[in-house]
Amino acid sequence: MDSQDYIILEGIYGAHNYLPLDVVITKARGIWMWDIEGKKYLDFLSAYSAVNQGHCHPRIVKVLQNQARKLTLTSRAFRNDQWPLLAKELCELTGFNMVLPMNSGAEAVETAIKLARKWAYQKKGIPQDEAEIIACTNNFHGRTVTIISFSTDPLYRQDFGPFTPGFKIIPFGDIAALEAAITPRTAAFLVEPIQAEAGILIPPDGFLNKAKEICQKNNVLFVADEIQTGLGRVGKMFACDYEGVKPDIMVIGKSLGGGCYAVSAVLSTGEIMGLFKPGEHGSTFGGNPLACAVARESLRVIQDEKLVENAFEKGSYFLEKLRTIKSKHIKEIRGRGLLIGLELYPEAGGARRFCEELMKEGLLCKETHENVIRFAPPLIINKKDLDWAYKKIKRVFKKLN
Ligand SMILES: *Cc1c(COP(=O)(O)O)cnc(C)c1O
């Protein structure tokens, strides 16, 4: 079978809920991927930042294999010898003191919403069923019905109602709007410290800090979704670290599983997380020993290989380099660490055609919304390979001028 055969099969039998580039990957290692025909590509997306450690990291794969032979699933009906260690290590790494394990990012966000509501009723004294959560325009927190209930993207919502009530929207980055939106019924403010899916939107300096301050003043929980920005992607361990902000609840996922397994987690204080009592929330696969062993090694790799520092250093290097590209199509280049967005003018004909051309050149990246190309290679990348990518990008902008 060649690539075309796989593309046809997928089109016939697979639901069409994505529009992938027409490249069929069969193996990957580190920053590189190979298609069915043996063509080599540099991965400049990292599975939406779920492979920060690089593809098939030998240490993570080894742990996965060993744990798979030993014990994979107990459910939380019984205990296992990996979950307590992951819980401890995660808390030590993040400075939180309690953690709840889930699988996907969306599940972890759902968990955070349930937790914030429980806190609102039990601690803040909001009347039952009246708690409100404030979210931001252009947010992306996942795809469940409750989460899309506060999406502002019609594409995510159309035909999926009725929606979950209890959410309010403010413009991302707007402190005055946050302050105005808070009422005695506000439980939490849910925010991505950098909006990645929306096109790598960075809030104004000081926004996170002021938002946290306002939340504190009004007895409102500050909930950070660091699923994509966390674990080194933006050049700090967490995007909130840029402003020294410690959320009341933090959600992580994606590269917590090292690209090998779906693992997510919700972190908080003992006072807040302690509100969950047995039976009130759970997941069959959440905290399974295979996931936990993989997550533990994934975290160790981030630390041992200094991926946070590398993302910071290589990110600034690459951002500067990208800014030397002259093209009438480029509106703005912005980013933190190795999460970089290149925004095109609407007249450029859409980011998609640039991504398709980059693919031909051996660089795999993806448009996010119409006009932004996201550059997000695995955090293990070195200068030489970034220089190679730069040449390809420069060439494509020359070609599509
Ligand atoms: C990817 C992502 C999610 C959803 O994670 P899934 O694992 O796809 O459910 C939520 N929030 C942010 C910021 C994300 O980038």
Image (cartoon, rainbow, N blue to C red):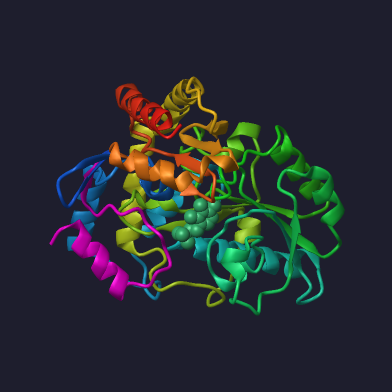
- Left/right placement of residue 205 relative to residue 266 reads right
Report the span colored magenta.
1-29
Would you identify the image quadrant in which residue 161 lies? bottom right
Q: Residue at x 42, y 39 (%)?
A: 376
What percent of the width, then of the height, locates residue 381?
Answer: 33, 31
**Residue 25 among those drawn in magenta:** yes
Q: Residue at x 50, y 49 (%)?
A: 368
Find residue 200 and report its image quarter: top right
36 or 295, nearer to the observer: 36
Depth check: give the residue in front, 41 or 266.
Answer: 41
Residue 85 % position (x, y): 38, 52
Q: Nearer the viewer, residue 107 or 142?
A: 142
Seen at 44% across and 25% down, the residue is 318
Q: Quadrant of residue 158?
A: bottom right
The answer to whether residue 158 is above or below residue 57 is: below
- Which part of the image, by quadrant, shows the N terminus? bottom left
Do we see residue 304 in this rendering? yes
Left or right of 345? Residue 77 is left
Q: Position of residue 302 (x, y in %)?
A: 38, 38
Q: Is residue 224 left or right of residue 266?
A: right
Whether residue 176 sits left or right of residue 341 in the image: it is right
Was residue 282 drawn as part of the magenta stretch in this picture? no
